[in-house]
């Protein structure tokens, strides 16, 4: 499987997954979530997927200062309805990272390790997404704006040609490269993270 090299350079998110530990799925329950994992989940790499990844990373740092985040212990709330804009994409990526599911999620084992009913939509808040620890009720609300990392000026015309099937193979490949170059800048330019992501 081939993919852009920069995926491997994105900071990994490390968590402890008690369910994986209990069932022997992952030794000691220590799990690494990578940007590539989220690309596989979403089926694509874009500024939205990148932003969801970074919001999860920043939220977990805030909620678990000095300790490893506990996967399956976090509720994810979204400000907007699930079918509005990119809300569903953001929710899917963040909930995957933190081990949260909606009504259809894992119901647990004798009252332990449940992952269901941990995702909510259309919740009033100041930010776009709020993550809440279930053990302490500590919350963090975040918003994301990648507009300060614009794409190449040729990207949108090439997208149009690619979508209406008038682009050559070379133009199609160039569009893909330019698209991923913007995603790379979002994920790897750490000094911009605090400007793109607002913690409310």
Image: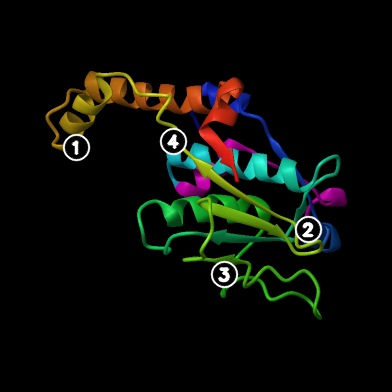
Question: Alpha carbon of mark 3 to alpha carbon of mark 1: how far?
Answer: 34 Å
Residue appearing at x 69%, y 59% in the figure: 132
Local secondary structure at mark 4: helix
**In this orientation, which residue lies closer to the viewer: 109 or 76?**
76
Magenta segment = 25-42
Name the side, left or right, on which 83 lies relative to 78.
left
Q: Which mark is residue 47?
A: 4
Residue under pointer 2: 20
Residue appearing at x 62%, y 72% in the figure: 117
Local secondary structure at mark 2: helix
Q: Main secondary structure of the magenta part?
A: helix
Q: Are marks 2 and 3 in contact (CB under 8 Å)?
A: no
| Relative image position of residue 122 (x, y in whole percent) | 47, 66
Based on the displayed image, in which of its 4 quarters is residue 176 positioned? Answer: top left
Question: Alpha carbon of mark 1 to alpha carbon of mark 2: how far?
Answer: 42 Å
Residue appearing at x 60%, y 21% in the figure: 191
Label 2 vs label 3, nearer the camera: 3
Residue under pointer 1: 163
Local secondary structure at mark 3: loop
Check if residue 32 falls in the magenta segment.
yes
Name the side, left or right, on which 94 lies relative to 12.
left
Label 1 vs label 4, nearer the camera: 4
Residue 45 showing in the rendered view: no
Which circle's residue, 1 or 4, is located before the other in the chain?
Answer: 4
Question: Alpha carbon of mark 4 to alpha carbon of mark 3: how far?
Answer: 24 Å
Residue under pointer 3: 102
Which circle's residue, 4 or 3, is located before the other in the chain?
Answer: 4
Local secondary structure at mark 1: helix
């Amino acid at each position: 499987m081939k993919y852009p090299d920069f995926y491997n350079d994105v900071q990994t998110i490390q968590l402890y997954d008690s369910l994986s530990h209990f069932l022997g799925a992952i030794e000691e329950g220590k799990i690494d979530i990578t940007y590539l994992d989220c690309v596989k989940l979403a089926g694509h790499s874009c500024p939205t997927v990148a932003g969801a990844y970074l919001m999860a990373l920043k939220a977990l740092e805030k909620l678990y200062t000095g300790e490893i985040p506990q996967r399956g212990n976090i509720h994810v709330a979204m400000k907007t309805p699930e079918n509005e804009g990119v809300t569903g994409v953001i929710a899917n990526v963040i909930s995957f990272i933190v081990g949260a599911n909606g009504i259809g999620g894992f119901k647990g084992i004798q009252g332990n390790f449940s992952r269901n009913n941990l995702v909510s939509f259309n919740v009033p808040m100041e930010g776009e997404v709020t993550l809440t620890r279930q053990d302490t009720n500590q919350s963090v609300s975040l918003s994301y704006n990648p507009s300060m990392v614009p794409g190449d000026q040729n990207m949108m015309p090439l997208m149009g040609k690619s979508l209406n099937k008038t682009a050559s193979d070379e133009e199609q490949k160039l569009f893909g490269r330019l698209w991923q170059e913007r995603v790379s800048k979002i994920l790897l330019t750490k000094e911009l993270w605090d400007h793109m992501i607002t913690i409310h």
